Amino acid sequence: MGQQAFGKDVLAKLLDTGTDEVVAVYCEPDRDGKPVDPIKEFAQEQGLPVHQPANFDDAATLETLAGHDADLMIMAFVNVFVPEAARETPRLGSICFHPSLLPLHRGPSAVNWPIIMGATRSGFSWFYP
């Protein structure tokens, strides 16, 4: 689950390793007048199922998510609320990847702000949402 170039890059790396099977990709719905999300384009090019639910509270969305029988959901650049019912659907739950040393630079532009602020170190965080 993710969006934009950041989510696409995480998906590409997962596919490149060849270690794990990616069973589906979830991203935000298309918006009129906006370019197609890079993660959606890439996932479709790879032949992966793409889902773009309006929210994750809907019973049909949760049923579709459960139908993938995933072991783990990886969330990369997700800025919508994903309720516990969705996060706990995969067998091992979910993990989230954030491109900063949390709690520093939480939120959008987490890669840009350390550079703008002259930080001498940066990194990334994996956590259980």
Image: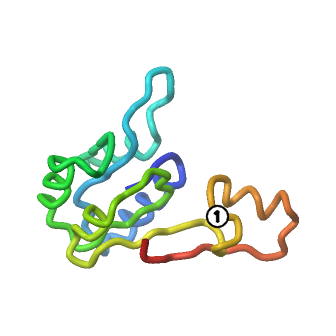
Decide: is 62 above or below 120: above
Q: Residue at x 26, y 70 (%)?
A: 88
Q: Residues within 10 Å of mark 1 (few under 14, many from 20)?
A: some
Whole-percent x, y for residue 129 in the image: 43, 71
- The residue positioned 84% from the left and 57% from the top of the image is 116
Circle 1 sits on which residue? 106
Q: Nearer the viewer, residue 6 or 16?
A: 6
Q: Is residue 103 left or right of residue 29?
A: right
Left/right placement of residue 59 relative to residue 80 reads left
Specify whether 118 is left or right of 33: right
- Quarter placement of the N terminus: bottom left
| Identity of the residue drawn at 50% across and 56% down | 77
Towards the viewer: 55 or 17: 55
Q: Is residue 14 left or right of residue 69?
A: right
Q: Quadrant of residue 24?
A: bottom left
Location of residue 54 with respect to 100 vertically, above or below:
above
Residue 54, x across and y down, in percent: 32, 40
